[in-house]
Image (tube, rainbow, N blue to C red):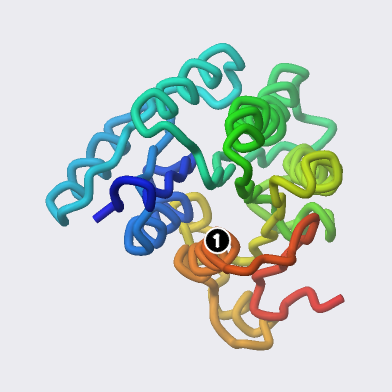
Amino acid sequence: MSGSGSDLKVAVVTGAARGIGLACVRRLLKSGFAVAMADLGSPTLDQSVSLLRTEGYEVMPLAGDVGDFGLVQQQAASVLERYGRIDVMVNNAGISQAKGLLDITEGEWDRILTVNLKGVFNWCKAVAPAMLGQGGGRIINMSSISAVTGGSAEAVSKFSYCAAKAGVLGLTRGLAKELAPTIMVNAICPGAIRTDLTEQLMLARYEQIRQTIPLKRIGTPDDIAVVVEFLATMDPCFITGEVLDVDGGQWVN
């Protein structure tokens, strides 16, 4: 189901074991991509890989921390060794941080930046040479509406998350210019999306949040995945350096 021969297209998705990442994997598989799934390597990754295989999809699991520069270089090399190319990079991996400035430790601050921002740099650095060498590629970075709004008092994550995700937007715009015209680099800012990460908050304030959204519903992982699929497959593509808000109109600019 992933294509073959010269028609083969290859995607890497980080944070791929559940939620938005897994939804992106499914969309890309259905679009004919061979997909490498990068995640921390918890049982959730193994379970997701097994589930996809029962559905007839063969995926390549990559277990490890996106914040580990050397490991990411090795993983990218292993994908290239197996498939010979990387066409789409989806930088989705991220962690939350609920602590504010007065409570957060230096280590916690460093960890949020390492996963949510350095992890994006690590994978961009790892795949860009291959994309440039093969004459094309697309990088899709997952930011957040919080990068623009600063979040809210009730948000799952506070200022450190907002800072990291704002960094992703700067990285996206900078690389879009630097890597053009060969590689297109875009970002997505999800709004209120119901995932494992946000489940408890959503349950407690579901109706209140829903009423703030013009489309009158909480988003789903597939609401984000369909936009990833669009950016990964649209042809011709005349979009780079853009940030797409996917929030049901909650934060109309």
Q: Is residue 200 above or below residue 157?
A: below
Q: Is 219 situated left or right of 172 in this image?
A: left
Residue 230, position in %: x, y? Answer: 55, 68
1 or 140, which is in the foreground?
1
Q: Is 55 situated left or right of 229 in this image?
A: left
Q: Residues within 10 Å of mark 1 (few under 14, many from 20)?
A: many
Residue at point 31%, 35% (across, down): 60
Residue 148, position in %: x, y? Answer: 84, 58
Residue at point 77%, 41% (across, down): 179
Residue at point 33%, 63% (across, down): 30
Q: Residue furthest front?
A: 6
Corner quadrant of residue 118:
top right
Residue kind at label 1, given as amino acid type:
Val
> Is residue 43 among what the camera can see?
yes
75 or 80, which is in the foreground?
80
The N terminus appears in which quarter of the rendering?
bottom left
Corner quadrant of residue 248:
bottom right
Residue where numbered disc 1 is placed: 228
Q: Is residue 142 above or below residue 77?
A: below
Q: Is residue 236 above or below residue 240?
A: below
Q: Is residue 55 above or below residue 136?
A: below
> Is residue 159 among what the camera can see?
no
Residue 6, position in %: x, y? Answer: 38, 47
Residue at point 41%, 29% (across, down): 79
How many numbered marks does the figure carry? Answer: 1
Residue 129, position in %: x, y? Answer: 64, 28
